C-alpha cells in the first residue's frame, strides 16, 4: 500500500502528539486518539483533519478527570470509553 495522508509530530498543538497510545476509528467518520503525554483525547475526521480535543480541566469533579489516557473506544451508541492510566480505571462518557 501507499501512505494516503499522515498527521503528527512531537508537541502539544492541534496536529501534534506526545506518546499517542491508542486510536479508534470504529465509526468510519471520526478517529479518536488517546494522546497520553498531553493528557487528552483528540478527534480527527476520516481525512485526519483536526476537529477537537477533550481534556480534563482543573477544578472539574474527579468523575470527569483523567490522566495519561492509555486507550480510547467509541461504543455502538456513541459512548466514549477512556482507559484512564493515571487513575487506574475506565471512564464511560455519554454523547452530548
Image (cartoon, rainbow, N blue to C red):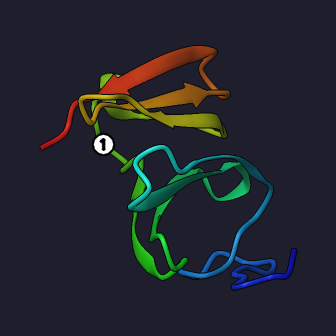
Is 50 positioned to the left or the right of 77 in the image?
right
Is 33 positioned to the left or the right of 66 in the image?
right
Question: For mark 1, what is the residue?
Answer: 59
Of all residues, the one furthest to the front in this rendering is 1
Residue 68 pos. (x, y %): 66, 40
Q: Quadrant of the C terminus?
A: top left
Residue 94 vertical placement versus 11 (above, below): above
Q: Toward which corner of the image does residue 54 lie, by quadrant?
A: bottom left
Residue 1 pos. (x, y %): 87, 74
> Badge 1, how many Cα within 10 Å: few under 14, some, many 20+?
few
Residue 7 pos. (x, y %): 69, 81
Residue at x 51%, y 17% (from the top left corner): 90
Judging depth in this view, the residue of 55 and 52 nearest the camera is 52
Of all residues, the one furthest to the right in this rendering is 1
Residue at x 73%, y 54% (from the top left corner): 37
Residue at x 59%, y 50% (from the top left corner): 39
Residue 14 vertical placement versus 72 (above, below): below
Residue 61 pos. (x, y %): 28, 29
Judging depth in this view, the residue of 3 and 18 nearest the camera is 3
Q: Toward which corner of the image does residue 4 lie, by quadrant?
A: bottom right
Q: Toward which corner of the image does residue 53 lie, by quadrant?
A: bottom left
Of all residues, the one furthest to the left in this rendering is 96
Is 52 positioned to the left or the right of 35 in the image?
left
Is 81 positioned to the left or the right of 95 in the image?
right
Residue 32 vertical placement versus 83 (above, below): below
Judging depth in this view, the residue of 62 and 71 nearest the camera is 71
Amino acid at each position: 500500500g501507499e501512505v494516503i495522508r499522515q498527521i503528527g509530530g512531537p508537541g502539544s498543538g492541534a496536529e501534534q502528539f506526545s506518546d499517542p497510545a491508542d486510536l479508534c476509528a470504529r465509526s468510519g467518520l471520526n478517529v479518536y486518539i488517546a494522546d497520553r503525554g498531553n493528557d487528552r483525547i483528540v478527534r480527527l475526521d476520516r481525512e485526519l483533519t483536526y476537529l477537537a480535543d477533550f481534556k480534563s480541566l482543573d477544578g472539574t469533579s474527579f468523575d470527569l478527570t483523567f490522566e495519561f489516557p492509555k486507550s480510547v473506544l467509541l461504543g455502538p451508541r456513541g459512548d466514549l470509553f477512556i482507559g484512564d492510566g493515571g487513575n487506574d480505571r475506565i471512564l464511560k462518557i455519554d454523547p452530548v
